[in-house]
């Protein structure tokens, strides 16, 4: 199976599994972080420097994505759910490429990514618009790890920063890189790990 067909298979799996979410309304934290959030609707660019007014959560890329949804399709749930669905497909594809890079086995990577796509543990993150931080942080983190493995340090650092700006839990990446590189005996120059830790500290 070619890479193009693999990507199509994974995306189709996500579309079939979560396509029904396009008819969902907003629920629970969606109202708190999106519908009743004046920053999303009236001051989107200030979210790059200001946390959420009530929760003090600082996830600027996520809140900017809510603003993009709002200014392109209005406050309609379908548009927000569609982007969540696309993000889950993106994370699944990123996982496939990362596992293929780590393991060197396309079939194993495909099966693992497919299981990831259909695993019910992701339901809350995908079906609730407010679960988007999980999706964006995971996607950028996996992309950063892949860039690191391919020796693209600047891209890895930039993607790592974007992951942290999506959700603070992405700060685990430096530890994941050390463990992964140790397990695969693919060490990079030590300065790269230091710069990655410095990025986390700066954030």
Image (spheres, rainbow, N blue to C red):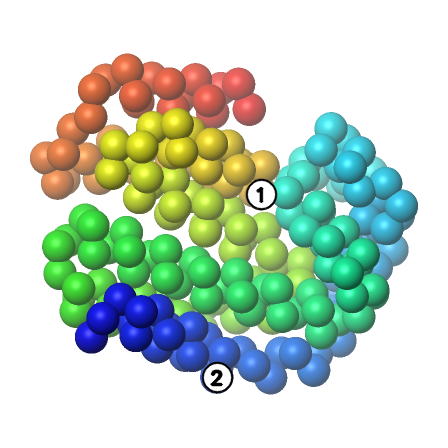
Q: Is residue 10 left or right of residue 47?
A: left
Q: Answer with mark 1 or mark 2, whichever residue precedes in sequence.
A: 2
| Image height of 142 relative to 182, above or below | below
Is 139 left, or right, of 75 in this rendering? left
* Residue 107, label in figure: none
**Residue at x 61%, y 58% (from the top left corner):** 131
Q: Which is more toward the observer, 49 or 11?
A: 11
- Secondary element type, mark 1: loop
Residue 17, image x, y percentages: 48, 81
Quickly name the residue at label 2: 16
Helix, strand or loop at mark 2? helix
Q: Nearer the viewer, residue 5 or 100?
A: 5
Rendered position, 27 above or below 32: below
Among the 4 quarters of the image, the one containing residue 185: top left
Please provide percent x and percent y for residue 167. Answer: 56, 42
Percent x, y for residue 33? Answer: 77, 52
Q: Dot 1 corresponds to which residue?
A: 166
Q: Is residue 96 visible?
A: yes
Left or right, 103 with respect to 31, comes to left
Neighbour tally class for label 1: few under 14, some 14-19, many 20 plus, Cα within 10 Å: many
Q: Residue at x 76, y 51 (%)?
A: 67
* Residue drawn where x is 70% and y is 82% of the image: 23
């Amino acid at each position: 199976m070619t890479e193009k067909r693999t990507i199509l298979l994974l995306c189709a799996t996500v579309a079939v599994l979560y396509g029904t979410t396009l008819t969902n309304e907003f629920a629970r934290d969606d109202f708190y972080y999106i519908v009743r959030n004046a920053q999303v609707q009236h001051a989107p660019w200030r979210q790059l420097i200001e946390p959420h007014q009530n929760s003090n959560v600082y996830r600027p890329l996520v809140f900017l994505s809510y603003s993009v949804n709002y200014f392109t399709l209005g406050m309609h749930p379908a548009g927000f759910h569609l982007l969540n669905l696309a993000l889950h497909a993106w994370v699944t594809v990123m996982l496939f490429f990362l596992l293929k890079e780590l393991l060197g086995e396309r079939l194993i990577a495909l099966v693992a990514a497919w299981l990831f796509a259909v695993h019910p543990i992701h339901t809350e993150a995908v079906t609730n618009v407010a679960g988007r931080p999980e999706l964006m942080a995971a996607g950028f983190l996996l992309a950063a790890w892949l860039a690191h493995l391919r020796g693209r340090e600047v891209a890895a650092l930039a993607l790592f920063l974007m992951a942290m700006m999506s959700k603070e839990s992405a700060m685990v990446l430096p530890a994941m890189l050390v463990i992964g590189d140790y397990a695969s005996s693919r060490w990079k120059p030590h300065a790269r790990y230091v710069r990655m830790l410095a990025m986390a500290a700066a954030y």
